[in-house]
């Protein structure tokens, strides 16, 4: 789609269909990485391991390649065909998901998670870069909000099915059944999605080391980007810890089966999460052009409200209390993603979009994961002698603290974002605001 087409029609089919396909790709991105959390109790029973090792395998093993390879892959995506990168990564990580059903040791499981992370590193940053080229700046928050429904859609559409398969056919069959459709989707993408025209020429073809170092220095010199990076890192700790350990929390504290867990997590995280993402995206999309601060200020408020809701979920003893807390946190937790990604692609300019998104994902993934699933696993083991199965209530309280801290970071970024726009002499952020 050319820039002229975008100006005439903000939602043409040439942009809408790629957005649909990229959202489907992202659904499998989130689903495949989340399946292990659903299967952890069964894997622990069959393969045997401590919670510390399971936390490392579910979190760090995946994220090590996902986050570190994401930077050079994003650097490449700023220069070559992004559609091909995404399709190849999708086919590979889907194959690794299916292969998870055949592991026989915890070490094999860790190796497959590493390779799955390498494949999934090809997904998010190139997808955000493509969407930024398909939609004008004022439409990006809503377009990215639609793209951001992938995680809750995975929960509501496929998580219950995955749980049913695991309950009736075993956790191995679940991985195989959920992995194979991604290979078909990769073929569909290659056949029906074109690489869009870039809104600016690719960066100069310098060597990887020289170009990457200069781009990284420029990004972190941008104070708004630096505060966004800090906030997203803290929210990453929340999301990854909750994704890895919530099914185990339900099993240990509320004694639910894997199918019951999937039926609660799926619709709650899914339907309510989708509502939060779309309402937040639509609200920001309709902000007057002079209300620049609130394009990041609204995500900051949402993160702040997620913290107490998480505490209510973890510490509540009655059914109404913990379900209510879980539902409220599901609404607020992911509101920040789309507007934050939209702000990032606006402030860094088109030549560093994929790289900037990959850095944000690095914070949310590698650093956030080190603070998230692995930390919860370690604290579980430290507290289990005193609290038994109830230990997970207290180890997971970090998911109540991190959103509040993230809210403070985003609030500061919002002020810098508004100042940057004013300094440019415009009421609406455009590409390249620094």
Image (spheres, rainbow, N blue to C red):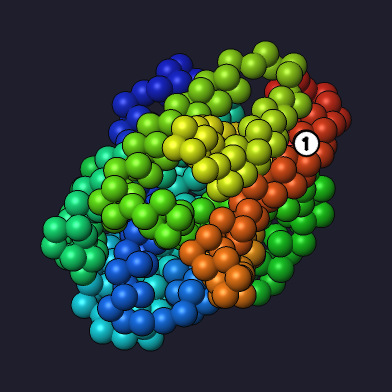
- The residue closer to the viewer here, 31 or 316, is 316
Secondary structure state at the residue bearing disc 1: helix
Q: Position of residue 129 (x, y in %)?
A: 51, 46
Is residue 127 shown to the viewer in this render? yes
- The residue closer to the viewer here, 402 or 132, is 402
> Taking 259 as reference, is 415 above or below it?
above
Name the residue beneath numbered marker 1: 411
> Taking 18 as reference, is 356 above or below it?
below
Q: Is residue 173 left or right of residue 274?
A: left
Instruction: Give the position of the N terminus as an image quadrant.
Output: top left
What's the residue at 51%, 23% (across, down)? 279
- The residue closer to the viewer here, 169 or 252, is 252
> Taking 198 as reference, is 37 above or below it?
below
Is residue 338 shown to the viewer in this render? no
What's the residue at 55%, 71% (across, down)? 384
Q: Is residue 16 left or right of residue 63?
A: left
Q: Position of residue 286 (x, y in %)?
A: 58, 15
Q: Position of residue 200 (x, y in %)?
A: 57, 43
Instruction: Give the position of the C terminus as an image quadrant.
Output: top right
């Amino acid at each position: 789609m050319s820039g002229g087409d975008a100006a005439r029609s903000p939602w043409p089919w040439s942009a809408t269909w790629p957005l649909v396909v990229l959202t489907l790709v992202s659904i499998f991105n989130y689903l495949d990485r989340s399946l292990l959390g659903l299967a952890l109790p069964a894997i622990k029973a069959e393969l045997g391991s401590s919670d510390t090792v399971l936390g490392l395998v579910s979190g760090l093993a995946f994220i090590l390649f996902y986050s570190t390879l994401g930077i050079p892959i994003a650097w490449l995506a700023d220069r070559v065909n992004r559609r091909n990168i995404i399709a190849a990564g999708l086919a590979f990580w889907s194959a690794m998901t299916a292969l998870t059903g055949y592991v026989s040791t915890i070490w094999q499981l860790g190796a497959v998670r590493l390779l799955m992370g390498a494949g999934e590193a090809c997904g998010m940053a190139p997808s955000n870069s493509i969407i930024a080229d398909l939609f004008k700046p004022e439409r990006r928050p809503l377009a990215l909000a639609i793209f951001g429904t992938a995680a809750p859609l995975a929960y509501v559409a496929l998580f219950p099915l995955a749980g049913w398969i695991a309950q009736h056919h075993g956790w191995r069959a679940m991985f195989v059944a959920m992995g194979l459709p991604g290979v078909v989707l990769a073929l569909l993408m290659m056949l029906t999605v074109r690489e869009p025209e870039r809104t600016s020429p690719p960066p100069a073809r310098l060597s990887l080391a020289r170009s990457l170092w200069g781009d990284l220095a420029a990004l972190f010199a941008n104070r708004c980007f630096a505060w966004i990076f800090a906030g997203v890192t803290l929210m990453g700790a929340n999301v990854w810890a909750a994704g890895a350990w919530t099914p185990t929390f339900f099993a240990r504290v509320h004694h639910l089966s894997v199918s019951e867990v999937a039926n609660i997590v799926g619709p709650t995280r899914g339907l309510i999460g989708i509502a939060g993402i779309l309402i937040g995206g639509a609200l920001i999309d309709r902000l007057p052009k002079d209300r620049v601060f609130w394009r990041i200020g609204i995500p900051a408020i949402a993160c702040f409200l997620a913290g107490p809701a998480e505490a209510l979920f973890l510490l509540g003893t009655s059914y109404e209390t913990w379900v209510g807390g879980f539902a409220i946190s599901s609404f607020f937790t992911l509101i920040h993603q789309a507007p934050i990604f939209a702000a990032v692609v606006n402030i860094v300019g088109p030549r560093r979009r994929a790289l900037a998104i990959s850095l944000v994902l690095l914070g949310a993934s590698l650093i956030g994961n080190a603070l998230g699933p692995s930390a919860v696993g370690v604290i579980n083991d430290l507290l289990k002698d005193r609290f038994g199965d109830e230990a997970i209530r207290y180890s997971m309280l970090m998911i109540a603290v991190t959103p509040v801290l993230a809210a403070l970071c985003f609030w500061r970024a919002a002020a810098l974002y508004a100042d940057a726009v004013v300094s440019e002499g415009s009421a609406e952020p455009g590409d390249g605001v620094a």
